Amino acid sequence: MDGVLVIDKPEGPTSHDVVATARRALGEKRIGHTGTLDPLATGVLPLVLGRATRLVRFLTASDKDYDATILFGVTTDTLDVTGEETSRPGGAPSREALAAALRGFDGEQMQVPPAYSAKKVGGRRAYDFARRDEPVELAAVPVRVSRLELLESGNNRCRLSLTCSAGFYVRALVRDLGERCGTGATLEALRRTRSGEFTIDEAIPLDALEPPDPGSPTPDPGLIPMERLLTSFPAVTVTAEGLTRVSHGQHVRPMDVSSAMPAASSEWVRVLDGGGTLVALGTRQRPSGFLHPEVVLI
């Protein structure tokens, strides 16, 4: 079983819990996810299965879309409503003040990750320090917000829709927004509607993986096959000889492909066999122009 399964994660379980459920239901040990969602968060959680696990680093590097509900006038240690309350300044910004503060988050910026996060500090996860009340200093990292919309506000809350880069923490945005508005804020709800090329429209509920009755066959999970992954990368089709060279990790030469080589500016190239199956990801070699299979999937 090779490909990607897009789960509509419910509130409550961790991303690891979702992976464990999928492993048990599908009988496949090689399953991972392409980007952690907090227990509070719901929505798109792509799972990689089988050979697709070798593509995780490519699938995690994409932008994400979120809908977030923010509660003003209170702060917590985890920066969301699951944590312990740390202050209650009270109040909420006006819609005009809120819109002005949000404009400061557009584009490239430096963001300090939350203390309760999986960022590593000295080989340990930041949340390990936080849970033991040990001080931890996290360095700011470059992130990007390419879209930020205020959908509604009122009743000490607002709802946002945003597109952000990989590595962006919505909880950190909420923390910083509350500080800029002078009211404090915490994340009340979060839903991811897109992760790279995977959208909520193709996601299935987690409980759809479980058979309705004991002994019943596992439902068809709607797996996205390998050939539909990373389609933003240019592709070449190899000959039978080229396929043999790929399987041995050898350079693919112009004579080994049945389609035109992509432009030299392309960093990564999908290598397909004659049937259209994804068999490798390659990089162009200079000055020869040969294609080297960096990630072999056969």
Image (cartoon, helix red, strand yellow):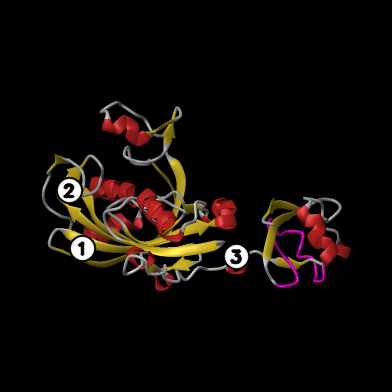
Which residue in the protein does label 2 denote?
Answer: 183
Q: Is residue 101 inside the magenta stretch? A: no
Q: Quadrant of residue 235?
A: bottom right
Residue 279 quadrant: bottom right
Task: Specify the amino acid type for callout 3.
Answer: Met
Counting residues from the start of the chain, the first of labels 1 and 2 encountered is 1
For mark 1, what is the residue? 95
In this rendered view, identify the residue nearer to me: 224 or 234. Answer: 224
Of labels 3 and 1, earlier in sequence is 1
Q: Which quadrant of the figure contains the C terminus?
A: bottom right
| Distance from the alpha carbon under mark 3 to that under mark 1 | 46 Å
SS assignment for the magenta stretch, majority:
loop
Residue 236 in the image, given as x and y percentages of width and height? 75, 67
Q: The residue under label 2 is which amino acid type?
A: Thr
Secondary structure of residue under mark 2? loop
Residue position for label 3: 226
Residue 15 seen in the current view: yes
At mark 3, the secondary structure is helix
Task: Mark 2: give few (<14), some (14-19) or many (20+) Cα within 10 Å.
Answer: many
- Of circles 3 and 1, which is in front? 3
**21 above or below 225?**
above
Q: What is the secondary structure assignment of the residue under circle 1?
A: helix
Q: Residues within 10 Å of mark 3 (few under 14, many from 20)?
A: many
Please tell me whether residue 265 belongs to the stretch shown in magenta: yes
Say which residue appears at 45% left-offset and 27% top-offset.
Answer: 122
x, y percent for residue 144? 45, 53
Distance from Cα at disc 3 to Cα at disc 2: 48 Å
